[in-house]
Image (tube, helix red, strand yellow):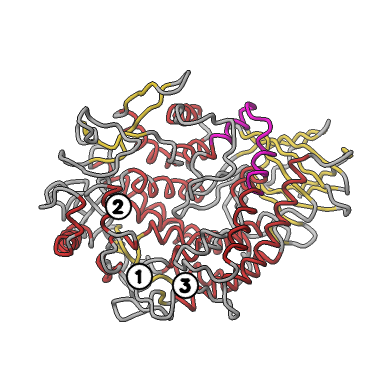
Amino acid sequence: MFEIEASESLARPPDWAVLQRTLLETMADAVDRFADGYFDESGEPYWPPDDHVGIDGFDDLLEGFCNWPLVYAMGGDERFLEHAREAYEGALKRGRETETPFGHPMVVDEFEQCRDWFHLGEGNRFIYNMGLAAPDDETVVDRAERFAHLYFDDADVNNYDGEKRLVRAPQTGSMGPEYSDLSAFGDRSTFGGYGSDYRWASHGLPWRDTAFDEAAELLDPANEERLYEIYRERCSRGDIPLNLGITSLMTNAYLHTGDDRYRDWVIEYLEAWRERTAENGGIIPDNVGLSGEIGEYTDGKWYGGFYGWSWGGWHYVGIGPTVAAENAVLLDGNREYLAFPRSQLDVLIENGIEVSEGPVHDTLYVPHKYGDPGDYHYDASGVLTEDDGEVLWRDGWYEFKPHRDDPYAFHLWYLSLAEGDRERVDRLRDWGSQDWKQVDFRTSTKHGAGEEYAWLAYLDGDFPDYPERRMEAAHAHVQDRLALVREDGGVPADLDEDYLRNRNPVFHRGLLQLTMGSPQPVYYGGLVMAQVRHFDAERERPGLPPGVSALVEDVTREGVSLTLVNGGGTDRELIVQAGAYGEHEFASLEYGTERARPASNAIRVSLPSGSRVSLSAALDRFVNDPTYAVPCE
């Protein structure tokens, strides 16, 4: 392994480095306090309560601690991993003891019994992060393989039809597709706990050919039952784009084992959806029947499926193509797979409308949904409307709004680093909404959308204070959550499935950006995609060594610039890996006056106490077989 030694002395560590280390230490103490207050003495969460019956919410429980192993993998204290293991085992136990309306538990064989891959993707981020944190843990590896096998053709649960390359239902899991039943979410709780009055009022009715004129009519239980009947007829069978999230489950298993059957599954299933998209004139259909026919249960329409173009729109449809393309590029190295999500974004842009809002730039309003004409009767705030206030509908497309809450275009650019994809990011930016050269210290969507633009301004050289501002914002978030912990004084009075997620004092986004040059993964089941990753060479574990900070200062098509600082009192050695999984290669390296060609995916760096080193590395990307393996072993 190529070795370098830092020779530049520090008068004092830079502010960003001090803030990084302080944040990791503060969060380690906070997670101790959080675990003591919000899990019982056996390590189980307090939700679901003993008398709970339902199928929804297990993913929300896991979201409350799924980033703990990720922060450990970036250099956090051992306590992050210890608490993560205990919390997950406790959640599994609680899930095994919680009944569903089907006569079996919410969690069967350690996997949710039957859910959609919007929610499964959210919860399964825990097992993906455990791969980064503990790749040698036999239990972690065993679960990765068992969970992936649920979607092989020879699995007893019958989730997948290998001959037709389709997943048999919008909701699947450890009990198979037989329980894909929306009405089972609970009494008057369409889409899980929100109630018809809220959910339909926010998203609109997905079908124009029903007997209902507006969402309010669903407050009548008889009408809601008829809606469930329509759902069962149209949306309880067959494949949908959200199922492309299963490719992360397969990629996770591959990163542990290197078994080609997982890679083959990802490529074959992605190609099946590309073929369906081509058959549909270039737009991904949102429903495919068990025969493989598009629109088999929707009178031949390619829209109107579960979480499809008329039902949540691009926010949900875009998850699958983006995540699957990322996984395929990682596994196969061919960035041509990115043409799939790129083509869908371009369809939206072609149908977009320029609106003058910002002082310099116009904002592009793109359609997020497609459906039949009619009155949609839902909360259309931020959406273009007709003169009478009705939602604008044009050639089937509607819900025209900015892309500020959509990370998919950013992920496309990040994987390709192509000029055209960067231009698309700039064009889709909501110029009228805010100054992107600032950091919001309090509010943020859970999937982190919008924060990428401030980071991009830093990478462009337009926001030099971003590292300090980003770390200060993370500190503010931690203190806000600790204030909630103090206010609760124990188990919260408003106990529900979100109680952990809404109080979790651990934040990873800024650390990902600054230390690994990585955006927030696609929240609904994407894997971490990064420029570099760090390992403690002395302790042979993932993450930066104690006292060491890292800052990725530039990301270009050619490579990255990185500064490493040892502000502690002990000499340290670390390994810098090209890519989160060693998928990249260091083609050349510049540091100080030195030049080298490591021809390796990892380098060893010696950092004496009170030293720093700045590296400029040219990268050959996606040329190596990716793996979770720790390179210092």
- Say if mark 3 contacts mark 2, CB within 8 Å: no
| Kind of residue indicated by mark 2 | Tyr
Q: Quadrant of residue 352?
A: top left
Residue 263 position, x and y percent, is: 46, 56
**Residue at x 35% of width, y 76% of height:** 53
Q: For the residue carrying disc 3, how many other residues have a C-alpha within 10 Å: few (<14), some (14-19), or many (20+)? A: many
Q: Which mark is residue 307?
A: 2
Q: CA distance from mark 1 to mark 2?
A: 18 Å
Q: Quadrant of residue 137?
A: bottom right
Q: Main secondary structure of the magenta part?
A: helix
Residue 327 position, x and y percent, is: 47, 50
> Against 87, is 610 above or below?
above
Residue highlighted by disc 3: 47
Assign the C terminus to one quadrant of the image. Answer: bottom right
| Kind of residue indicated by mark 3 | Trp
Residue highlighted by disc 1: 55
Nearer the observer: mark 1 or 3; the answer is 3
Residue 616 position, x and y percent, is: 72, 34
Residue 502 position, x and y percent, is: 51, 58
**Residue at x 24% of width, y 52% of height:** 305
Q: Secondary structure at mark 2?
A: loop
Which residues make up the magenta segment?
A: 453-475
